[in-house]
Amino acid sequence: MTADTNNDLMERGRKLFAGDWRFIWASPSIETLPPMQGLEVAFAGRSNVGKSSLINALTGRNGLARTSHTPGRTQELIFFDGPQGGNLRLVDMPGYGYAQASKTKIAAWTDLIHQFLQGRSSLARIYVLIDSRHGLKDVDVNILKTLDKAAVSYQIVLTKADQVKPAELEERIAATLAALKTHPAAYPEVLATSSRTGAGMPELRAAMVRLLKERGA
C-alpha cells in the first residue's frame, strides 16, 4: 500500500468516526438481535482487555460504551450505529475468560456468541483484542480456533500499548504474527493501540474503511 493510499484511508477513517456514533441495541439472546444493516465489525477479548475503552477512543465518545473494572460486566451483544445509520456498525461482545457470574450464565453467553458468529452474514470482521502486556493466552488461542472453524475473518489488535516498552511491544507483535500463521481466518497484520494516548486509532479506523471498500459498502 502506498503512503498516499494509506493517508487517504486514515483521513476517511477520521471523518467516519468523527460523526455521531450512538448506542442502538443490546441483545441478551440470539432471538433479540437487531435487523442486519450494512457491515458489522465486532470486538472480542478477555474480560477487562479494554474493549469498551477502545470503542470510546475510536469514536471520540468517552461515554458511548460503558467501561468497568469489574470483569464480565458486558453480558450482552451491544450494537452502535455510525453517522446517519451509515454502512458500518460496531458490536461490543461479552468478554471471555473470566466473569463473576454463574456457570449457567457464562454458558448462555458462550452459546450466544457462537450463534452470532455462525448466523450473521453482515458480520465482516472480528477484532480480537489482546493485552500488550501479556500477549496471547491459551484462552485467546481457543477463541481463534473457534473463529477459524466458523470461517469468520478476524484481526488481532493489541491494547494498552502505552504500558509496554517499545522494544517489548515489537517483540510482542512479531510473536503474535508468528502465531497467526497457523490460523487460516486471521488477517495477517497486527495493530498496536492505546485508548489512553490514541496511538494506533488512525490505523484501526483506516482498516475499517479499507474493509468497507473491499466489501463494496
Image (spheres, rainbow, N blue to C red):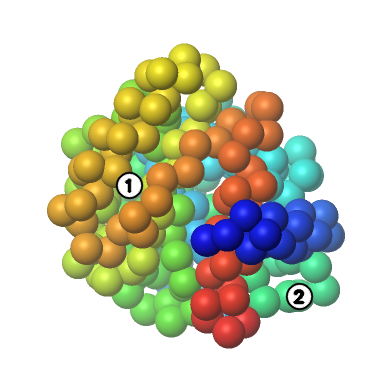
Relative side of 141 to 94, left or right:
left
Residue 216 location (% of width, % of height): 58, 84
**Quadrant where the C terminus lies?**
bottom right
Q: Residues within 10 Å of mark 1 (few under 14, many from 20)?
A: some
Q: Which mark is residue 106?
A: 1
The amino acid pointed to by label 1 is Ile
Circle count: 2
From where the camera sits, is residue 43 visible? yes
Viewer-proximal residue, 175 or 69? 175
Q: Residues within 10 Å of mark 2 (few under 14, many from 20)?
A: some
Q: What secondary structure is found at the residue carrying circle 2? A: helix
Residue 150 location (% of width, % of height): 25, 70
In the rendered image, the vertical position of residue 206 relative to residue 197, given as above or below: below
Choose mark 2 or mark 1, whichever is in front. 2
Q: Which corner quadrant of the image does residue 45 belong to?
A: top left
Relative side of 200 to 100, left or right:
right
Q: Which residue is mark 2?
A: 85
Relative side of 94 to 136, left or right:
right
Q: Which corner quadrant of the image does residue 30 belong to?
A: bottom left
At a point 47% along the width and 72% down the height, the residue shown is 123
Q: What secondary structure is found at the residue carrying circle 1? A: helix
At a point 45% along the width and 53% down the height, the residue shown is 127
- Among the two numbered marks 2 and 1 on one chain, the one whose residue lies closer to the N terminus: 2
At a point 76% along the width and 38% down the height, the residue shown is 62
Residue 184 location (% of width, % of height): 22, 63
Relative side of 3 to 99, left or right:
right
